[in-house]
Amino acid sequence: MTFEASLIVDRDFDLAPLDRRLFGVFVEHLGRCVYNGIHEPGHPTADEHGFRNDVAELTKELGATIVRYPGGNFMSGYNWEDGVGPKDQRPRRLDLAWFSTETNQVGTHEFMAWCRKVGIAPMFGVNLGTRGPDEARHYLEYCNHPGGTALSDLRRAHGAEEPLGIKFWCLGNEMDGPWQICQKTPDEYGRIAKETAKLMRWVDPSIELAACGSSAYDMPTYGVWEDRVLEHCFEFVDYLSLHSYFVKPPADTSTESFFAQIETNARYIEDTVAIADSVATRKRSSKRLKLSFDEWNVWYRARHGEHLKQAGWPEAPRLLEEVYTAEDALLIGGMLTMFMNHADRLKVACMAQLCNVIAPIMTEPGGPAWRQTIFHPFAQAARWARGQVLRAVVRSPGYANARHGELPYLCASVVDDAATGQTAVFLLNRSLNDEMDLSITLRGLGMDRQLVQAEQLHSADLHATNTVDAPDRVAPQALNGVAIAGEQLRVTLKPASWNVIVTKAARA
C-alpha cells in the first residue's frame, strides 16, 4: 500500500546555521579502536607512523569533522605524560576502565599526526577522575603554549616546534556514573569543573570547554545533575555534554519502538536546554549554553560479559564490537535528521566510536577494512548537509507509541546552502510495510531546480549486516523517480528507508 505525506520549508523560516561539528566521531583507548584499529604497524597499508591508510581513507569518506580523544571512561585514569616523549621509554599501565593493558605507543603527538593525516579537528579531554585542575592546565600548556616555559619547551624537545592548537576540550567524562574511575557528586564535579575551566582559560583564552552532563537520559540523577553542575560552572563553560546509546529492551524489541528513540533523544535535548536556560534565568544571565552530544550510537548486543571485559589484562582485546544491521542504519539516519533540527543549540556530536568498537568502520588485523551499515547515512549527511537548517513542516500519518503518543512515519530535515544553491533533503520513512508518496515544497529557494543526487538506503531484510565477506550487502542505491516542477518535488519512498535528495536552483 501507499500513503501520502508532505514536507514544506520556506527560505524565510530558518532555524540556525548548521555547525559542521555535528558530524564528529570518537576514538578511545578501548579494545581495538586505536591498536589494531586506526593504528597497526606492519599492516600492508600502514604508513611510517603505523597508521592504516585504508582506515584513514574510509575516515575521510565518512566525512567526520571533529574527533573526541582519548576517552571515554579511559580518560578518568589517564596520565597524559605517559603518552609523550620517546616511545621506548613510555610506561605500560593497567587501564582500570576496560581492564586492559595500555602500552601508550599512541599518545598526543601520534594522534595529532593522525588528525592531520585525515583532515579532522581534535577534541581532547582532561582527566578529572584521578587528577584535577593542575594536570589539566599543564597538559594545555604543553599542547598550546608557543614556548619559553618548561612544558612548552618539553613539547618542542619532543619534536613539535609549533603549538598543537587543540581548541576544544572536555572537562572529564561521565563523572556521574558509578562505573567511572573516581565518580563525583554533582557538587564535587561542578566545583572541579569550574576551577579547571578557570585555570585552562588563563592558559589559553581561545579554547572552548564542555562540562559533563548526565551520562544518559535515564540516569536517576538526570536533571538534578545538570542543575547542580551548572550552578557552579555555568559562567566558565561553553557546552554541556549529552550521551545516549540506543537499545532494544527485552520488554519491547519492536522496530517501531526502536525508531521512537529519535523522539526520546529529541526530548533529551529539549529538556537539557530547558534546565540550562533555567540556570541562566536564576543567574540573570543572557548566555545560552550550547550542547555537545559527544557520545551516541546503537549499542545493545555487544554490551555485557566477554564483550565488556576479558581476563588477564590483555592488550587491545576485542571489546564492544557491535555488528550493525540495516535497521540500525535507519535509526542512525533518523537521529541525524533530529540533530539537524536542533541546530540552534546542538553544535557538536560525536558518533561513538570510529573503528571496531561500536563503530562504522571495521577491520581485521593484517586484513581488510570495511563499512558497517551505519557508515552510510552518516557519510551521506556529512557530505551534503551544509548551510542553513530550515524549519521543516511535516504532515504524515503515523503510528502509536506508548511513550510519545502518535509518531509520524516521516522524519525529515532540510539544509540549504546559499553559497552553492544546493538544498539537501534528508528523509526517513518509518513505515515498515507501506510506501510513502511524498510531496516536497522548497518555497523561496529558487526555480528550475536540477537534481544533483538522489540516494536511498533500503534492505528487504532489516537484519542484514555488512561483513568482511559481504562488505556491501547494505549500501546506498539510486533513488529513482524524483519529479521536479518549479519549487515542488515528488517522490515515492520505499518502506523502512533512509533517503537523501539534493537539488540545485538554476535561478532565484
Image (cartoon, rainbow, N blue to C red):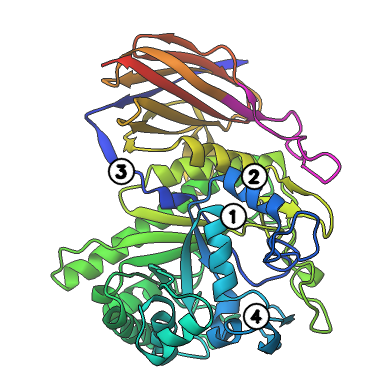
Q: How crowded is mark 2: few (under 14 residues within 10 Å), some or many (20 or more)?
A: many
Under circle 4, the secondary element is loop
- Could you tell me the amino acid type at mark 4? Ala
- Could you tell me the amino acid type at mark 1? Asn
Q: Magenta segment: does it hold 457? A: yes
Front residue of this view, candidates 164 and 418: 164
Mark 4 or mark 3: whose residue is earlier in sequence: 3
Q: Does the residue at mark 1 contact the one at mark 3 (Cβ under 8 Å)?
A: no
| Magenta residues, start to end | 455-478
Q: In this view, does 321 lie above or below 145?
A: above
What x and y, as percent, mark residue 51? 68, 61
Read off the residue under disc 1.
297
Mark 2 or mark 4: whose residue is earlier in sequence: 4
Q: Residue at x 41, y 61 (%)?
A: 292
Read off the residue under disc 2.
374
Quarter occupied by residue 318: bottom right
Q: Does the residue at mark 2 contact the one at mark 4 (Cβ under 8 Å)?
A: no
Left or right of 30 in this view: 119: left
Residue 351 in sight here: no
Q: Residue at x 81, y 71 (%)?
A: 306
Q: Does the residue at mark 1 contact the one at mark 2 (Cβ under 8 Å)?
A: yes
Q: How far apart are marks 4 and 1 (CA)?
A: 20 Å
Read off the residue under disc 4.
97
Read off the residue under disc 3.
17
- Residue located farthest toward the left when viewing the structure as drawn: 284
